[in-house]
Image (tube, rainbow, N blue to C red):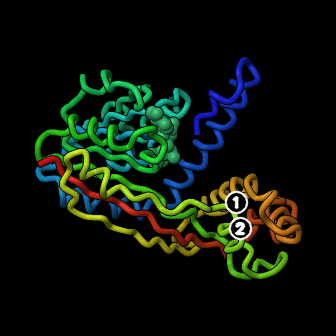
Amino acid sequence: MNAHHDTTGHVGHERAGEADRAMARLLELDAEVLASYLAELTGLLAQRVAPGPTRILDLGSGPGAGSLALARQFPAAQVTAADISTQLLHRLQKQAAARGVADRISTVETNLDEPWTKITERGPFDLIWAASFIHHVSDPVRTFTRAFEQLRPGGLIAVTEMDFFPRVLPEDTGAGRPGLEARLHQATNTQPPHEWTGPLADAGFVVEERRPFEIHLDTTQAGPALNAYAHLFLAKLRSHATDVLEADDLAALDALLDETHPQSIMRRGDLSVRTTRTTWLARRP
Ligand SMILES: C[S@@+](CC[C@H](N)C(=O)[O-])C[C@H]1O[C@@H](n2cnc3c(N)ncnc32)[C@H](O)[C@@H]1O
């Protein structure tokens, strides 16, 4: 995610900047394409946090998909967005200003693997949100324990993970053999889905629900950002596929990623989004 560690000096910073920009773009498109799912999830939280939360903490906020959706769902809430990346937090501030909620979202640049001093000043919180983040931390139970300490008694944490990368292509793309995307995912995604029920309980939480959200959006439901979103996701998978896919599949994938090719992902009207995201809802007793 944050590539600042892999090289040193100016070139390293530029590469880190590029990696953050690409990641920010992908996360912003994700929020746009999956807006209906985000609205459903924040709507569920509205039923579970009563009265409505006034202080919300977004852990590993990135450019703010969660913070912005939460600010929309809870108009009386102040949202604190915490992340290690200056660049992603800057994008979040710009988005917040563009949507007229800059006065309700504040950012904290911090490494959440280190003591949460800057966060403690803003708590306690009624609701903590952590989407696609916990798998990044070095010690999930320690992170959940710190989150527990930041919540008021009765407060809720909502932890979400992507079970697998979204599928976006039709079975037969017209480029190469049918079933390309399934083979690409099988070859590049070797990790089982994350499971946080045990670590949440170990930190003292009462896990109230573990809810998988099955997401199926056709091209109309996903909206105009779908082609760029699909292109970025497949390009990301392509970068891991060189040594694990057959040559004909790599050639077909490259054709799909080539914006000048007749079968290009950027020109297609037959894309869709199929994915599952799981949310754990857990309460501080
Ligand atoms: C996959 S992104 C998810 C962003 C956002 N929650 C979303 O759903 O769009 C993971 C985020 O965690 C942040 N992150 C990773 N390790 C971190 C750490 N140790 N402390 C703070 N933020 C971290 C990254 O900078 C990145 O913004």
Q: Position of residue 283 (x, y in %)?
A: 18, 51
Compared across the picture, whether 90 is left or right of 198 comes to right
Q: Residue at x 47, y 68 (%)?
A: 276
Is disc 2 placed on a helix, strand or loop?
helix
Q: Residue at x 42, y 41 (%)?
A: 99
Q: Amino acid at mark 2?
A: Leu
Q: Which residue is mark 1?
A: 234
Mark 2 CB near ligand 1 (8 Å cut): no
Mark 1: give few (<14), some (14-19) or many (20+) Cα within 10 Å.
Answer: many
Compared across the picture, whether 1 is left or right of 267 comes to left
Quick one: label 1 or label 2, which is nearer the N terminus?
2
Q: Which residue is mark 2?
A: 184
Q: Position of residue 136 (x, y in %)?
A: 48, 42
Q: Tell whether label 2 touches label 1 (CB within 8 Å).
A: yes
Q: Position of residue 122 (x, y in %)?
A: 24, 27
Quarter of the image where the N terminus is located = top right
Q: Nearer the viewer, mark 1 or mark 2?
A: 2
Mark 2: give few (<14), some (14-19) or many (20+) Cα within 10 Å.
Answer: many
Q: Residue at x 61, y 69 (%)?
A: 167
Looking at the picture, does residue 196 appear above or below residue 90? below
Q: How many marks?
A: 2
Q: Residues under labels 1 and 2: Cα distance?
A: 9 Å
Compared across the picture, whether 284 is left or right of 245 comes to left
Q: Amino acid at mark 1?
A: Leu
Of the pair 101 and 65, the residue shown nearer to us: 65
- Is residue 129 in sight in this rendering? yes
Q: Residue at x 18, y 33 (%)?
A: 124
